[in-house]
Amino acid sequence: MYRYEIILYWSAEDAAFIAEVPELPGCMAHGDTQDDALHHAQEAMAAWIEVAQEIGRPIPEPRGRLMYA
């Protein structure tokens, strides 16, 4: 399990829960339920990290809770 912050919200446009991982650019997932979206986000994080390792991209350390203005 990864320790990156996940932002979870309902998207009426997509009729699904969206899970975004801000520390991993472009890493996001969706699901019919919050649990589904979180499960898919874990899979997306694993894939993001695997590809980053393959192409030599740095993998950010999880910072915990992020602050937004």
Image (tube, helix red, strand yellow):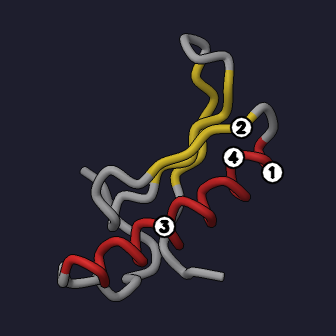
- Please report the residue visible at 56 percent of the width from the left and 47 percent of the height from the top: 19
- What's the distance in space between the residues labelled 3 and 4, CA to CA? 15 Å
For mark 2, give the secondary structure: strand
Whichever of labels 3 and 2 marks the residue nearer the N terminus, that label is 2
The kind of residue on which mark 1 rests is: Asp
Is 48 on the left or on the right of 5, as rendered?
left
Q: In the visual, does 21 lie left or right of 29?
A: left
Q: Earlier in the sequence, mark 1 or mark 3?
A: 1
Please give the residue where the numbered disc 4 appears in the rendered image: 37
Circle 2 sits on which residue? 31
Kind of residue sitting beneath label 2: Gly
Q: What residue is disc 3 on?
A: 47
Q: Which mark is residue 35?
A: 1
- Asked whether the residues under the numbered discs 2 and 1 touch, taking CB atoms below 8 Å apart as contact, a structural biologist would say yes
Residue lying furthest top in this view? 13
Q: As shown in the figure, which amino acid type bears the numbered disc 4?
A: Ala
